[in-house]
Image (spheres, grey):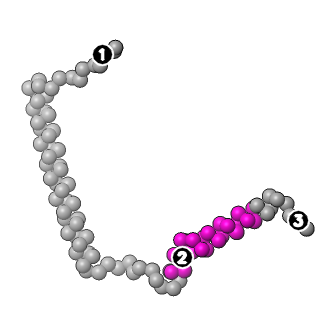
Amino acid sequence: MAGDPAQIIAAVGCFSVIGFVVLGPIGRAFADRLRGKHRDAALDSGEVEALRDELHSVRQQVAELAERQDFAERLLAQARDKGLLSAPKEPKDK
């Protein structure tokens, strides 16, 4: 007995999705987890030290950028106070 075409399409779609999940990256990750091949969440001391060094470097860069921004803001404020900055000119219609 032949089934309804909509039911056949739905069944094929369900099997495709289940096959993708089981055979795809999600299924492989789940299987690796079951086999115990997942990465341990703990970092070794070398990785921790490297992350600390990188964090220190980023903090220095942020501090330098903040100093540069403060300097630029002071220059703009001085120029505005002296009247050296003018308002933007309106574009002329052609």
The majority secondary structure of the magenta stretch comes to helix
User: Identity of the amino acid at label 3?
Assistant: Ala
Secondary structure type for disc 2? helix
User: Mark number for residue 67?
Assistant: none
Residue 64 location (% of width, % of height): 15, 53
Find residue 13 and report its horizontal and vertical position in percent: 70, 63
Three-letter code for the amino acid on which mark 2 is drawn = Arg
Return the residue at label 3: 2
Closer to us: 21 or 84: 21
Q: Earlier in the sequence, mark 3 or mark 2?
A: 3
Residue at 41% of width from left, 79% of height from top?
39
Label 3 and label 2: CA atoms lie apart by: 35 Å
**Chain-order first, disc 2 or disc 1:** 2
Q: Which residues are magenta?
A: 10-33
**Residue placed under numbered mark 2 in the picture:** 28
Dot 3 surroundings within 10 Å: few (below 14), some, or many (20 or more)? few
Q: Where is mark 1, residue-wise? A: 92
Placement of the C terminus among the 4 image quadrants: top left
Secondary structure type for disc 1: loop
